[in-house]
Image (cartoon, rainbow, N blue to C red):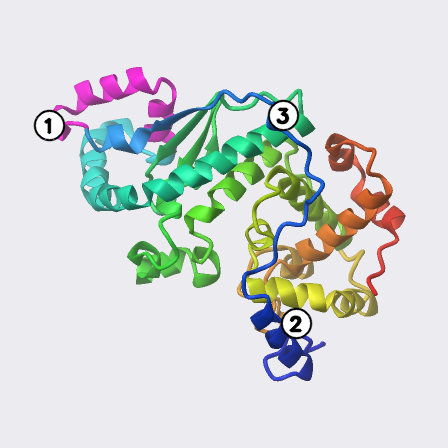
Amino acid sequence: MIAILSVNSPMNTRIIALFLLLSLGACNSNEDAPNVSGIKIQLTQQHFEQDFFAIDTNQLEQSIVALDKKYPGFTTLYLSNILALMPESESSDLKNFYSAYLPLYKQSTSIFKEQKKQTQKIEQGFQYLKHYFPSYQLPTKLITFIGPINSFGSILTEDAIAIGLQLFMGKDHPLYTSEEGQALYPSYVSRKFEPSYIPVSAMNNIVLDIYPEQMSGKPLIAQMVELGKRMYVVDHLLPQISDTLITGYSSMQLDACLNNEKNIWSFFIQNDLLYKSDPQLVREYVTDGPFTQAFGKESPGNIGQFLGWQIVKKWMKKNNQLSFDALMKKDPVQLFEEAKYKPS
C-alpha cells in the first residue's frame, strides 16, 4: 500500500498547496478542437415536465391522450419504463407520483437558465459527434422530464435524448441529502447531481449507444483502457467542459492524480495487477466509490479510468491520423502494449 494521497503524508501537503493555486479546477486541454461551427444540427427542445404537471388529474385519460399527441412514443415510455406503472393501478399510482413530485417540478423551474446553458453544450456536442461519427443518426429532439428519484438521468429513444431533471437539481437539494436520498445515492454520487453534468451524462449515453460495453471478464488493464477510450472521446465531444466534469473527480482528486501519476502507475506495476481478472479486485479500481482504498481517502474512486485515459492519450499521440471509430474498435490490450505508457 502507498499513501501518496493520504491526509497525513508529506506528498499530500504538496498536493493541497497545488490545489489551492489551481482552485478553479483542471480545464479541458483540447486546444486543437476542430471548427464545427458550420455543421448544422436539428435539435428540437421539449419540456415534457411542463406539460405533464399541467394535466388535469381529475380527467387523467383525456389528459394522457393529449400528452401522447404532443409527445408520441415518449409518453408511453415515460409511463411504462420511467414511472413503471402497471395498467391495473395506473390511475392511482400516477396521481400519487404527480402529488409527490409536483413540488420538485416547481423547484426545477428555478434552474431553467442553467438547463438552457447545458442544452447549448449538448447542441455543440452534437456538432462534434457529427464531425467524428458522421454516420451516427443523431437524436432530433431533446426532451426534459421529471421521474422518480431512482429513475434515469439520461435516456436515448429512437429520435430523442431525454434528460431526467430529478437527478440534476444540485448536490445540496433535500431530495438527495435526506436519509432516503443518501441510501440511494451516497454523497460521492449525489455531488455529481449538478446541472453542469447534464452534457456529460448525455454524451456518455450516446457513446455507450454507439459502442456498447463489452468489459465483463476482461483483465484489469483491458477494462481500464476501455474506460479511458470512452473518456477520451467524451472529452473531445465536450472540449469546453472542465476535465473535473468529464472524469467526475473533484478538482483536488484530479490534481492529486495528475501530480502522482507515476506513483499510482508504479503501484499497479509493483503489485502485478494489470492482467488480473478477479472480479472483486477489478471492481476496486474501475467502479465508482468514495475513494480507492489502496490510495487513501483523498483519492477518487474509479482511479483505473484515469490511468486508462492517460494510456489512450499516449497512444493517440502516436496514431493521431486514426478515427475515433478506429480507436474504439482497437483491442484494449494491444493498445496498451503499443502505447508503451510509462509516466515520468
Residue type indicated by callout 1:
Asn
Secondary structure predominantly adopted by residues drawn in magenta: helix
Q: Which mark is residue 130?
A: 3
**Segment tinted magenta in the rendering:** 55-81
Name which residue type carries label 2.
Answer: Phe
Q: Secondary structure at mark 3?
A: helix
Residue that appears at 80% across and 43% down: 316
Q: Secondary structure at mark 2?
A: helix
Of the residues tagged 1 and 3, which is closer to the observer? Answer: 3
Asked if the residues shown at circle 1 and circle 2 are in contact, with their CB atoms under 8 angstroms apart, the answer is: no
Q: Magenta segment: does it hold 293?
A: no
Q: Is residue 342 visible?
A: yes
Q: Find out whether the residues at labels 1 and 3 contact each other: C-beta distance under 8 Å.
A: no
Determine which of the numbered discs, if any, sits on residue 58 in the image. 1
Magenta stretch encompasses residue 68: yes
Packing grade of label 2 (10 A; few <14, some 14-19, many >=20) is some
Rendering quarter of residue 275:
bottom right
Q: Which residue is mark 2?
A: 295
* CA–CA distance in space, label 2 to label 3: 39 Å
Against 98, residue 1 (above or below) is below
Q: Decide which of 161, 214 is in the foreground and name it.
A: 161
Evaluate if marks 2 and 3 touch, with contact meaning CB atoms under 8 Å apart: no
